[in-house]
Amino acid sequence: MAGRVTRRQPVVRLAPGRHVGSRETLAVEEPLEIRVGGRPLTTTMRTPGHDFDLVAGFLVAEGVVGGPEDLLALRYCSGTDEDGANTYNVLDAALAPGLPLPATANRAMLTTSACGICGKDSIEALRVRARWSVREDPVRVEPAVLAELPDRLRREQRVFAATGGVHAAGLFTAEGEPLCVREDVGRHNAVDKVVGWALRAGLLPLRGHVLVVSGRASFELTQKAWMAGIPVLAAVSAPSSLAVDLAEEAGVTLVGFLRGDTGNVYTRADRCVPTPRPTPRPASQPASQSDGARAAAAAATPNGAGRG
């Protein structure tokens, strides 16, 4: 699978007054058909790799599963190429008994690498209610920690370094420690791979965590954060108006334009404002000998009465 993430491609490199032959590394994009209980659900265009995580995260976003016990098995099916070799482009998920099929199981659609919600009937249909609330999450992320996260994410983007052609999503603790970073040609796929990893590790809901994405913050990515119980979503680029509206509704802290030591907090800024420092108390002055004598005399007199 690792060899299918990138591909070398001959190119002609143009430059002023000349052109030369060269080779470039491309990010691979291939379809993945997702089935549930043998029934086709959807096909997404993705970068091969971490496919089990992708499908698990997709099912979290659809409101189908919420823990590893809901997902009995994931297996590749017999999708083959012209030579009869398995393409590993068809994956079937087996749900626990009693779990209903996704509401989207009857829609025949293609999810492109640019959009993970194409084909849904309406915006209202997208407002899948999460099984966990994030509004009450007490997490705080210091601005200095938040500012470091895009660089920490960038250091983990090995495929981007080779191709310049993939998005990334990273899950961090409130202290800035990276837990999981995934890359994909589709930004929604990268988030699904992170959430799916967390589901399979038994970590949902992801209270007290921060999700960082390398591009813009869309409605869809905000919904995926909400569905996974993530209280803070930070993006290096702009949010959409609908993303801000949904973050406000859900109680998600939404940060955009997180670059260098600056960023815009669009919702729930209380989670990432600087922690107030306690005002130091002035050093107390030692009591004088006369003060001490008067205090002793007062203590020796009933009710603190004065001398007779």
Image (tube, grey):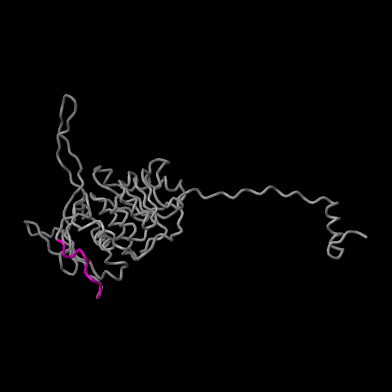
The N terminus lies in which quarter of the figure? Answer: bottom left
- Counting from the top left corner in percent of width and height, residue 81 is at 9, 57
> In the image, which residues are magenta?
98-107
Quadrant of the image containing the C terminus: bottom right
The x, y position of residue 37, in whole percent, is 18, 70
Q: Is residue 58 left or right of residue 266?
A: left
Left or right: residue 289 compared with residue 278? right
Residue at image location 17% in from the left, 30% down from the top: 14
> In the image, what residue occupies the spot 24% across and 61% down?
55
Farthest residue in the left direction? 82
Out of 224 and 47, give the one closest to the viewer. Answer: 224
Tell me, yes or no, if residue 88 can be seen here: no
In the image, taking residue 164 as reference, residue 82 lies left or right, namely left
Any magenta on residue 17?
A: no
Q: Is residue 101 magenta?
A: yes
Residue, far right: 308
Q: Position of residue 19 (x, y in %)?
A: 15, 29
For the residue pair 220 and 11, the one nearer the viewer reads as 220
In this view of the protein, which residue sits in the foreground, 122 or 247? 122
Q: Quadrant of residue 227?
A: bottom left
Residue 129 placement (x, y as % from top left): 31, 63
Helix, strand or loop: magenta stretch = loop
Q: Is residue 233 visible?
A: yes
Q: Residue furthest bottom?
A: 97
